[in-house]
Amino acid sequence: MSGNVGFQGPLALKHGDVVRVVTPKGVPLRHSPWLYRHPQKSDWLPIAISHQHAEYKAVASLPDQLLVDRFKPLFGQSAERGMAGAVLNVANQAPVMARFDVEPKAHANVMQLYDKVITPSRIAAPPLLAAFPQKKHMLQMFAFQPGITLEEVGNGWEAWVPMVMAQLHTLQQAGEAGRSALKRRTSRFKSLLHRLLPSVFAQALREGVNKVELTFFVFLMRVTARLPRVLSHGDLHRNNVLIDTQQQQVALIDWDRWGYLPLGFDAALLLRGLPWPAVENLAGKRADQQLGALVFTYLFQCLDVAHFMRSEEAAELRARIYKLYKQFKM
């Protein structure tokens, strides 16, 4: 079967209804779920809806001490894409952002990072206000952070990168000073790094790599092992950076995957999709910063671009990485 396949039919939707489109195996299609908002009503949903829709059961079971009258649901990126959080309008205070069903170990890791690094070092991140136990999980409450994601900025988003890099530099400095005090507990949230190299290697085998490409891949593994390990966000894609254009400020969110990772990983993930010369220019002035960012840029490109390893761009990037590595060893 080829071409576009779809359907058209009327849906009787009410304000706050959630529409899901899934495959026969239950896998949600792109942009699913979709929240229907009546064009003549507010983006906020009344709290009464939470007792009428199974989708909003997490809101319906909020602690009694939270006097919530309306909310905005936030859907997660897991396979089910259930409601991962919500912006809550709480009586007599500013809106807050709630995260539902957080694993206790994951909460302990985030709370530790806030207590020992983010708060004392004034890293730009929404303050962690409180947490409440909910059955076997935790409910996290953050201060609401206004703005749009860096991904939503569109053309010219690169202009905000220096501000983000400054935050990463502060994070790395604080991480070096507190290396002995930070003890991350094992949880289901792991850095994307732990599956990056296996994914690239599997992709290379599918595409049939030659000896030169395989040798370089082994070389990258060695370089990755020798790069300095610095305190990192661990999941710094552009949807995890909020931009307040009015206040000219940035904020980093979703710290679940923090850890001591090779220098350059955060930068490469943030800049993923840019041409490698632009990545090198934005990653920093030091050879180790540029080397780390380009190593992971190469690996991401192997996943994002079919047969990238056999392209002219890949050959140029390999040559640049070899040159930077020589400078790094000096």
Image (cartoon, grey):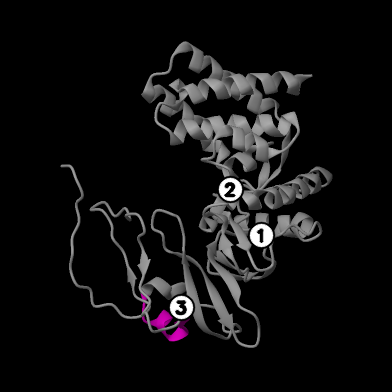
Q: Nearer the viewer, mark 3 or mark 2?
A: 3
Give percent across and percent down for residue 301: 49, 33
* Residue kind at label 1, given as amino acid type: Ala
Q: Which residue has dot 2 on it? A: 235
Q: Is residue 301 visible?
A: yes
- Image coordinates of residue 292 in percent, x first then y, are 66, 32
Magenta stretch: give its range: 45-53
Residue 279, percent across and down? 61, 37
Amino acid type, label 2: Asp
Q: Write the residue at 24% across / 78% down.
A: 12
Q: Earlier in the sequence, mark 3 or mark 1?
A: 3
- Looking at the image, the residue that sits furthest to the right is 177
Residue type at tag 3: Asp
Distance (Cα) linking label 3 and label 1: 23 Å
In the rendered image, is residue 217 in sight?
no
Dot 3: within a 10 Å radius of its alpha carbon, few (fewer than 14), some, or many (20 or more) residues? some
**Lower position in the chain sequence, tag 3 or tag 2:** 3
Q: Nearer the viewer, mark 1 or mark 2?
A: 1
Which labelled disc corresponds to residue 43?
A: 3
Give the quarter of the figure containing the C terminus: top right
Badge number at residue 251: 1
175 relative to 279 in the view: left or right: right
SS class, disc 2? loop
Residue 18 pos. (x, y %): 35, 71
Q: Residue at x 77, y 54 (%)?
A: 117
